[in-house]
């Protein structure tokens, strides 16, 4: 199961990605926003990331206008490794090397097809472990 959330700047992209995941038979929990009214992206980031931290979700998807603000907010939360993604290669590496548990994208900077391809690239990749785990451990040590 995957958890997703967006602010008003990516509300439409969220709907596209939810439909894309549903077509693959993947369950999605939506943490809002549920219409185009203005909301604050840190609130959405907190909701999604807390659910990821609970362990009941495979990973989280965060969306705002550019993906920048919501990814910054997510990375303030201990235990979250949120990758801002703009292409398939970065999506693959975010999983393989960083074992990202949240991904962020921008609804005003990515078209729906590219966003779906990015999501697929992330989901199809696997964490490589090894030297990358050591680096993740060092990232988490920075949270202390």
Image (cartoon, rainbow, N blue to C red):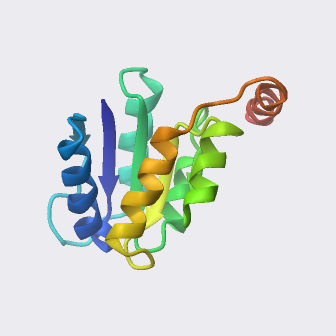
Which residue of the protein is positioned furthest toward the bottom in this rendering? 108
The structure residue drawn at horizontal position 37% and vertical position 52%, both measured from the top left corner, is: 43
Quarter of the rendering occupied by the C terminus:
top right
| Residue 87 spot, x, y in % from top left | 56, 65
Quarter of the rendering occupied by the N terminus:
top left
Q: Nearer the viewer, residue 53 or 116?
A: 116
Quarter occupied by residue 108: bottom left
The structure residue drawn at horizontal position 32% and vertical position 46%, both measured from the top left corner, is: 4
Count of numbered labels shown in the rendering: 0
| Residue 114 spot, x, y in % from top left | 42, 68
Q: In the displayed structure, would residue 61 be above or below residue 141?
A: below
The structure residue drawn at horizontal position 82% and vertical position 33%, both measured from the top left corner, is: 135
Q: In the displayed structure, would residue 77 be above or below residue 66?
A: above
| Residue 41 spot, x, y in % from top left | 40, 61
Q: Nearer the viewer, residue 14 or 138?
A: 14
Q: In the displayed structure, would residue 42 be above or below residue 53?
A: below
Q: In the displayed structure, would residue 95 be above or below residue 33?
A: above
Q: Is residue 131 visible?
A: yes
The structure residue drawn at horizontal position 23% and vertical position 61%, both measured from the top left corner, is: 16
Q: Is residue 72 visible?
A: no
Relative placement, left or right, of 34 versus 3 is left
Which residue of the protein is positioned furthest toward the left in this rendering? 35
């Amino acid at each position: 199961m995957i958890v997703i959330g967006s602010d008003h700047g990516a509300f439409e992209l969220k709907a596209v990605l939810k439909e894309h995941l549903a077509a693959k038979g993947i369950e999605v929990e939506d943490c809002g926003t549920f219409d185009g009214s203005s909301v604050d992206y840190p609130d959405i980031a907190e909701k999604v990331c807390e659910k990821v931290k609970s362990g009941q979700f495979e990973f989280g998807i965060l969306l705002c206008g550019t993906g920048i603000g919501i990814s910054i907010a997510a990375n303030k939360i201990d235990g979250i490794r949120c990758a801002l993604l703009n292409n398939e290669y970065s999506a693959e590496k975010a999983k393989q090397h960083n074992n990202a548990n949240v991904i962020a994208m921008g609804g005003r900077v990515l078209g729906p097809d590219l966003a779906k391809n990015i999501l697929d690239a992330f989901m199809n990749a696997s964490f490589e472990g090894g030297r990358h785990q050591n680096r993740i451990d060092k990232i988490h040590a920075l949270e202390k």
